[in-house]
Image (cartoon, rainbow, N blue to C red):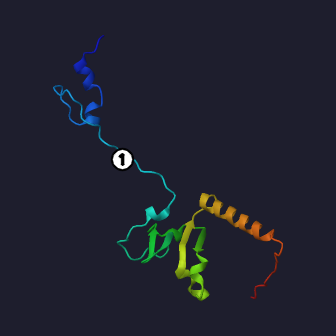
Amino acid sequence: MEISNENSLECTFKNYYYGNVSDNETEVSKPLKIRTQKRTNNIDVFFEKPTMKQAAEYSSTVAQLTNGGTNYISSRVDDVSKATHLIKIDVYDMKKLRGVPSDQHWKFANTRIKYYTQTEEDDYYSNTQELIYNITKHIATKNNCKKYFIEAKP
């Protein structure tokens, strides 16, 4: 069975890629450009100027310090009701903390994360436990490491 030239145009995606192309056209128009987004690990792409001023009180959040203030993203659900653990991470630039009282440090964190996890099998919980272990091992193996214990009073 032989397919004619007219039918072969109908069985292609030529019209999709080149727009409306009639059989009478002798010159093919340029293909449509398909936009592709490059993958990046920069978290800035998640932060836009928010329309809401405050997140739900017990939701997982990430805050990032900017020149004009602090941007937040939130899960906007009550994560604490099903949570088994809370992971909090604050990252600071020590240059910004000079002369700042320690109870005010939180205002100058480059990134603050509050993440409620529902199970110890959660990958983020496991990764956090691994990070804690590696940092502890790094500190414990330093030459001048000092170990001490403070007894909790009832």
**Quarter holding residue 5:** top left
Q: Position of residue 22 (x, y in %)?
A: 18, 29
Q: Position of residue 10 (x, y in %)?
A: 25, 25
- Is residue 50 shown above or below 103? above
| In front of the other: 110 or 63 | 110
**Does residue 66 show up?**
yes
**Does residue 122 show up?**
no
Name the amino acid, label 1.
Arg
Furthest residue toward left: 24
Left or right of 136? Residue 18 is: left
Q: Position of residue 151 (x, y in %)?
A: 79, 84
| Residue sitting at x 38%, y 77% | 53
| In front of the other: 99 or 1 | 99
| In front of the other: 139 or 88 | 139
Give the quarter of the figure containing the N terminus: top left
- Is residue 66 shown above or below 125? below
| Residue sitting at x 46%, y 69% | 74
Give the quarter of the figure containing the C terminus: bottom right
Q: Position of residue 144 (x, y in %)?
A: 83, 76
Mark 1 residue element: loop
Left or right of 46? Residue 142 is: right
Say few, some or many: other residues with alpha carbon within 10 Å of mark 1 (under 14 / 14 to 19 / 20 or more).
few
In this figure, which residue is indicated by the disc labeled 1? Answer: 35
